[in-house]
Amino acid sequence: MRERPLHWRGHILSAGDPQPGDQAPEGYIQWHAWAEVQHKAGLRQKECGKCGRWKYPQELSGEEVSCTGITPRGKKRTITMPVCNACADADAGRAILAEASDER
Ligand SMILES: [Zn+2]
């Protein structure tokens, strides 16, 4: 496995070219240019277990959800799926709101 570049959150190049590991840009065309770079760098998207959107590793929060389903053969199976940053942030926001309403 390749090491993640140290400056992966920052924009090292001023040219504005997307770099592998960069966060997704705003805008449709920019996003596609960015996604192509991620793909060429060997990064692959995973499906977020909450919103069902496909996200590159740098867009995933590191949190996971597991859900148990029944296979076509009737066996129970638990799968673990990653949670994207957006869903993790939304969860954190809800947790804060829930705490605040408990205190009333
Ligand atoms: Zn999500």
Image (cartoon, helix red, strand yellow):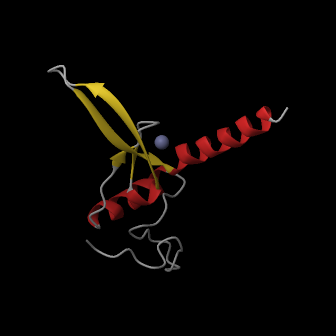
Residue 79: x, y in percent? 30, 38
Residue 1, quarter of picture? bottom left
97 vs 70: above or below:
below
Identified at 52% across, 75% down, the residue is 11
Q: Residue at x 26, y 64 (%)?
A: 42
Residue 41, quarter of picture: bottom left
Q: Quadrant of residue 62?
A: bottom left
Q: Is residue 71 left or right of residue 17?
A: left
In the displayed structure, 98 sits above or below 44; it is above
Residue 66 percent location from the top left of the image: 38, 38
Q: How many marks?
A: 0
Nearest the eye: 10 or 15: 10
Report the residue that reaches farthest toward the right. 104
At a point 30% along the width and 55% down the height, the residue shown is: 44
Q: Nearer the viewer, residue 33 or 56?
A: 56
Image quarter in which the C terminus is found? top right
The residue closer to the viewer here, 101 or 56, is: 101
47 displayed left or right of 85: left
Q: What percent of the width, then of the height, locates residue 39? A: 29, 60
Q: Is residue 11 above or below residue 96?
A: below
Q: Residue at x 55, y 47 (%)?
A: 88
Viewer-proximal residue among 23 and 88:
88
